[in-house]
Image (cartoon, rainbow, N blue to C red):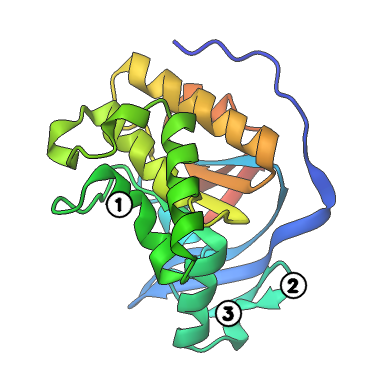
Amino acid sequence: MYQYTTISMHIDKKTAVIDAQTIVKSYGTSIVLKGVSCKVYAGERLALTGPSGSGKTTLLNCLGGLDHFDSGTILFSGTNLHALNSTELARLRREKIGTVFQFFNLLPTLTVTENIELPLQLTKTPKAERIGRVQHLLSKVGLLKRGSAYPSELSGGEQQRIAIARALAHKPDLILADEPTGNLDSVSGQSILTLFREITDDHGPALIIVTHSEEVAAICHRRIHLKDGVILRES
């Protein structure tokens, strides 16, 4: 069990990274989101909770520009996502958003260093800066000596820490995490949650976590509980 009883407050409530209003999303005849509204601020950790099929991952994907929504408005740091074409959306995700998946999604043919460096190559960051940033992140996640290893040579907890380092490489304004500790043991999971807290407290990105876990939700400043595509409660 993770022991987190005090949540530090490093939230800039003047800066809404995400401002979503009345989001509706359907797949065929199934309405998955039914007018959901929420805001997420710089430095804030927000948990999306609720039963399977409640719309948590769909909402996460819409907020991060990974999925189109039918109606409503999502402003990302003031930019209307609906007004962006596919190229502009891809650029925004590449430059402003970091994503952490439950199954890590590391590229198996690339080393740890190459996996972390990839988003920096996509944003055409100069090589010297890429090297320095990768080394800093490897140190931050406690894997400085594993840079030449391949994902298959790492434990699940180590792979997730590398996935987080990769998500942070381009200094995003928003981090999206979908069940980030779902496949980890309790010790590895606790280290990941500690890392998320440190990142948001020290550097100020917003963090949105989809989770079924009370322990994960406990590190967040706020949680939104969804059921059947609507917000049942906030706390």
Q: Is mark 3 on a helix, strand or loop?
A: strand
Residue 107's quadrant in the figure?
bottom left
* 48 sits to left or right of 205: left
Give how far apart the Cα atoms at labels 1 and 3 are: 36 Å
Residue carrying label 1 = 115
Give how far apart the Cα atoms at labels 3 and 2 are: 17 Å
The type of residue carrying mark 3 is: Ser
* 27 sits to left or right of 110: right
Near-viewer residue (227 or 1): 1
Residue carrying label 2 = 78
- How many numbered dots are placed on residues in this image? 3
The residue lying at 70 percent from left, 16 percent from top is: 6
**Residue lying furthest right:** 14
Residue 123 drawn above or below residue 157? below
Which is nearer the N-term, disc 3 or disc 2? 3
Residue carrying label 3 = 71
* 22 sits to left or right of 168: right
**Coordinates of residue 170 in the picture (x, y in percent):** 52, 57
The residue lying at 63 percent from left, 76 percent from top is: 72
The residue lying at 49 percent from left, 66 percent from top is: 125
Give how far apart the Cα atoms at labels 2 and 1 are: 31 Å
Which is nearer the N-term, disc 1 or disc 3? 3
Q: Which of marks 2 and 1 is in front?
A: 1
Residue contact between numbered discs 3 and 2, judged by CB atoms under 8 Å = no
Near-viewer residue (52 or 40): 40
* 84 sits to left or right of 210: right
Badge 2: residue crowd in 10 Å (few <14, some 14–19, many ≥20) = few
The type of residue carrying mark 2 is: Gly
Badge 1: residue crowd in 10 Å (few <14, some 14–19, many ≥20) = many
Q: Nearer the viewer, mark 1 or mark 3?
A: 1
Badge 3: residue crowd in 10 Å (few <14, some 14–19, many ≥20) = some
